[in-house]
């Protein structure tokens, strides 16, 4: 049997930071401040600095980051928010949870990301914001998107849940729109040991309001006076400590992902397999290595038989999911076609050279028609 190649190996990353995590664990246990406190503040400061933003507000998860940002911006009932249909459902879910209406947009056939034309086609008189999703760890043309949004008076919110460390013309993901929303789900490029999220922004009033909303609407400096209807979405100290321990390694891990993606791209340059393209000016971090492939079901099954684990991100577009059908306004051909073709290849920073070679060889073998012998 051929050696098994996993889709992701979180244990390898954990082993690399185990010493720093153990030390941080001891500090948190000794201090016994498990919600908020120094560990959370240290990570918020470090993450804001990494993202090139003035403020970072830790929250419970990436979905909360989006929802609370929308609420803090005053976006709710009667408002529309543009969302690319090719994304994880949380991007649209957060809009509905905030009381607003998602308006789905199609994406580029090259990058599978939102384009200025797609954005402009989706704008209506009710549009208040657009969630620009940096899917797969790649960023779209943020200059053009911000220009289109600005002309229409539309706020840009970055869904950077898969793009920790990605840049657009040198500017970090999360620092370009009015706010950047991150998830630190364990499988992300920077992952916690559970659920966690954050919002980064350069606007002090927005950061202040987010801190109130994440903590039951408590007035700043008061424990029992609540000035708003908020929620319970606080980043806990244990997750903050893990993220602080991992952050110094994020750039090296992202470089490893880029190197793996480059090997995939070179290996399939002359084949029917097409890796999703990067926008010129963008520097992605390859949270996922997504390819468009022919006869996906057969190919994936054959790879499974050969010991290669793969994924599909995402087989059902948001506008075709049952709870969101009522928001669909028509077909989105690029998104719908991609949903039948995309296949995510093994991608994690500790993927060995021999494993990458094994994936490439297996894909080429799976694409080669079998000879038929006639007696």
Image (cartoon, rainbow, N blue to C red):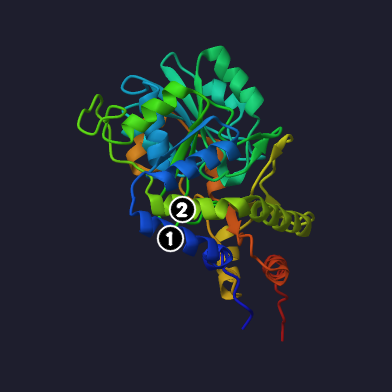
Q: Nearer the viewer, residue 57 or 303?
A: 57
User: Residue shown at 43%/28% (left/top)?
Assistant: 207
Query: Does the image show residue 141?
Result: yes
User: Residue shown at 72%/86% (left/top)?
Assistant: 375
Q: Is residue 169 left or right of residue 121?
A: right
In space, the residues marked 1 and 2 are separated at their CA atoms by: 7 Å
Q: Residues within 10 Å of mark 1 (few under 14, many from 20)?
A: some
Q: Where in the figure is residue 54, as x and y percent of width and height?
A: 54, 29
Q: Please give the label number shown on residue 25.
A: 1
Query: Does the image show residue 101?
Result: no
SS state under label 1:
helix
Q: Where in the figure is residue 87, as x and y percent of width and height?
A: 50, 42
Q: Which residue is mark 2?
A: 241
Q: Where in the figure is residue 168, as x and y percent of width and height?
A: 67, 34
Q: Residues within 10 Å of mark 2 (few under 14, many from 20)?
A: many
Name the residue at the front extreme.
Answer: 30
Q: For the N terminus, which image quadrant?
A: bottom right
Question: Relative to residue 22, is residue 169 depicted above or below?
Answer: above
Q: Where in the figure is residue 175, as x and y percent of width and height?
A: 58, 31
Determine which quarter of the picture holds residue 214: top left
Q: Is residue 354 left or right of residue 145?
A: right
Name the residue at the bottom extreme.
Answer: 375
Question: Relative to residue 81, is residue 239 depicted above or below?
Answer: below
SS state under label 2:
helix
Q: Residues at badges 1 and 2 in contact (C-beta under 8 Å)?
A: yes
User: Residue shown at 55%/34% (left/top)?
Assistant: 174
């Amino acid at each position: 049997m051929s050696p098994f190649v996993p889709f992701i190996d979180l244990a390898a990353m954990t082993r690399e930071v185990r010493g720093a995590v153990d030390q941080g664990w001891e500090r948190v246990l000794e201090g016994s401040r498990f919600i908020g406190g120094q560990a959370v503040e240290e990570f918020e400061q470090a993450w804001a600095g990494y993202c090139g933003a003035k403020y970072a507000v830790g929250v419970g998860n990436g979905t909360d980051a989006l929802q609370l940002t929308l609420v803090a911006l005053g976006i709710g009932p009667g408002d529309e928010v543009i969302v690319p249909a090719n994304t994880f459902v949380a991007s649209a879910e957060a809009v509905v949870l905030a009381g607003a209406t998602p308006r789905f947009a199609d994406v580029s056939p090259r990058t599978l990301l939102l384009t200025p034309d797609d954005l402009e086609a989706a704008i209506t008189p009710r549009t208040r914001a657009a969630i620009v999703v940096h899917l797969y760890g790649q960023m779209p043309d943020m200059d053009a998107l911000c220009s289109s949004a600005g002309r229409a008076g539309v706020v840009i919110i970055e869904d950077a849940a898969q793009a920790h460390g990605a840049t657009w013309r040198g500017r970090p993901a999360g620092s370009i729109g009015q706010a950047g929303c991150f998830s630190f789900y364990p499988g992300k490029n920077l992952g916690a040991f559970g659920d966690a999220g954050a919002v980064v922004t350069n606007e002090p009033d927005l950061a202040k309001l987010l801190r109130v909303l994440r903590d039951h609407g408590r007035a700043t400096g008061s424990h029992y006076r609540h000035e708003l209807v908020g929620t319970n979405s606080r980043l806990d100290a244990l997750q903050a400590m893990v993220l602080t321990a991992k952050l110094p390694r994020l750039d090296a891990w992202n470089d490893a992902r880029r190197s793996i993606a480059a090997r995939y791209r070179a290996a399939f340059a002359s084949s029917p397999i097409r890796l999703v393209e990067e926008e010129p000016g963008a520097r992605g971090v390859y949270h996922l290595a997504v390819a468009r492939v022919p006869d996906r079901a057969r190919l994936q099954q054959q790879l499974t038989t050969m010991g290669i684990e793969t994924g599909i991100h995402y087989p059902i577009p948001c506008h075709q999911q049952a709870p969101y059908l009522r928001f669909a306004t028509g077909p989105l051909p690029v998104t719908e076609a991609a949903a039948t073709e995309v296949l995510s290849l093994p991608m994690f920073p500790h993927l060995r050279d021999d494993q990458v070679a094994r994936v490439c060889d297996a894909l080429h073998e799976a694409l080669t028609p079998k000879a038929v012998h006639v007696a």
